[in-house]
Image (cartoon, rainbow, N blue to C red):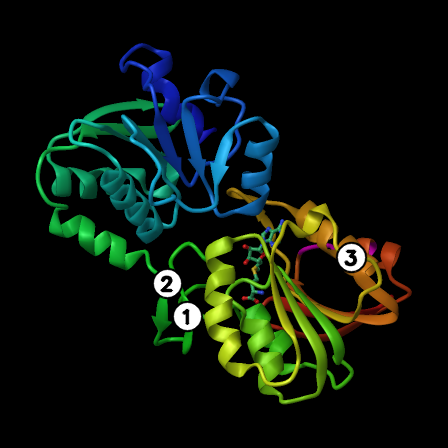
Amino acid sequence: MSTIKALLHPFTTGMLKPPAQALMLRAHADAALDADWRQNLLCITGFKPDHDALLAGGFKVEAALPAEAGPFDAALCPLTKHKADSLAAIAQAWAALPVGGLLLCAGDNDTGAASLQKDVAKALGPLETASKFHARIFWTRKQEGEMPALLKGWLAGGATRLVPETGFHAGPGMHGWNKIDRGSKLLADHLPGDVRGRIADLGAGWGYLSAMLLKTGRHLKGLDLFEADAAALEAAKLNIQPLSGEPPIRFHWADVTKGLPRQRYHSVIMNPPFHSGKATDIELGTAFIQQAAHCLEKGGLMLMVANRQLPYEAAIDAHFKERRLVAEADGFKLIEARA
Ligand SMILES: C[S@@+](CC[C@H](N)C(=O)[O-])C[C@H]1O[C@@H](n2cnc3c(N)ncnc32)[C@H](O)[C@@H]1O
């Protein structure tokens, strides 16, 4: 069920008057977001596929909230399962509103919306609420006064920081932000000597695989990180730049499924995404495999880790000449393939 449909429910049913100028944080394209919203909504999303889909739909979109944007009479927050990230978005929305502005949130029941609603009521006082489409919907109006202390804490809690558990910079909402992905560790532990030359890291996240590759100290001609999540890519810069010696390193905010340069790389390393929203989506990984084959030179090497049960082998065989299982552990498999 669509969180955006739930979020817009108070407007579509007349419970709330549609705003003249609104802001939506963590926005994503959705059928419920009809053309009427194109003129009076500024969408903010750092996730490239959502950013591009909204732009293609004729919406105004920014990767981050510009300081001079507004004024807005409403701020809309679709909530996700990433609690700290959702709370940070709510605090950011509150900060962007004038006194009297409407703060409206909605989250699916199975992603912890009830708990978020409780937190917001504790910070901002009694809320108006509705329940529809298996989602909680709640809203309030901004009161006079300084940002409440709880909201200040939420802003800080959503920020990118040095994470003691990993020793790398990351923030809530990013994949594996406070623990090393076990699949990626399997890949890092088995980096073969012939991962060399010009390398692409597809779906690089906050840069773990690239960092581990650079830490081997081997000679590279270049390293390109491709990542859809703008905040993760910024964290990757913090993690990678101090490690970079000789090789030119480039950071690309990109939707890998939409295409990569042809035959540019000697090697590709990747732990592809396998979720679209809440659902497991093998098509995403399959598109990554196609793009890996496309961007590798002849004989180039792809090193890919995936959950053991995800059936990527047929897609690899369709696009690569050879495939080999390098290692299996902890429910993950590491596959090497030659273009
Ligand atoms: C399984 S995580 C791996 C992250 C990182 N490489 C690691 O090893 O920890 C997959 C990454 O792909 C990114 N991603 C998802 N869809 C993408 C797309 N269409 N294009 C580029 N990156 C994408 C996600 O944001 C996430 O950072």
| Residues at circles 1 and 2 in contact by the CB criterion of under 8 Å | yes
Q: 265 above or below 85?
A: below
Label 3 and label 1: CA atoms lie apart by: 28 Å
- Of residues 266 and 59, the one drawn nearer to the viewer in this rendering: 59
Upstream in the sequence, badge 1 or badge 2?
2
| Residues at circles 2 and 3 in contact by the CB criterion of under 8 Å | no
Q: Amino acid at mark 3?
A: Pro
Q: Position of residue 112 (x, y in %)?
A: 32, 43
Q: Amino acid at mark 2?
A: Thr
Q: Is residue 253 visible?
A: yes
Residue under the point 20% across and 56% down:
153
Residue 169 is tagged as 1
For residue 81, side relative to residue 202 (left or right):
left
Residue 261 is tagged as 3
Upstream in the sequence, badge 3 or badge 1?
1
For residue 297, side relative to residue 71 (left or right):
right
Viewer-side label of 2, 3: 3
Among the 4 quarters of the image, the one containing residue 244: bottom right
Residue range of the region highlighted in magenta in the rendering: 310-314
| Residue that badge 2 annotates | 160
For residue 165, side relative to residue 16 (left or right):
right
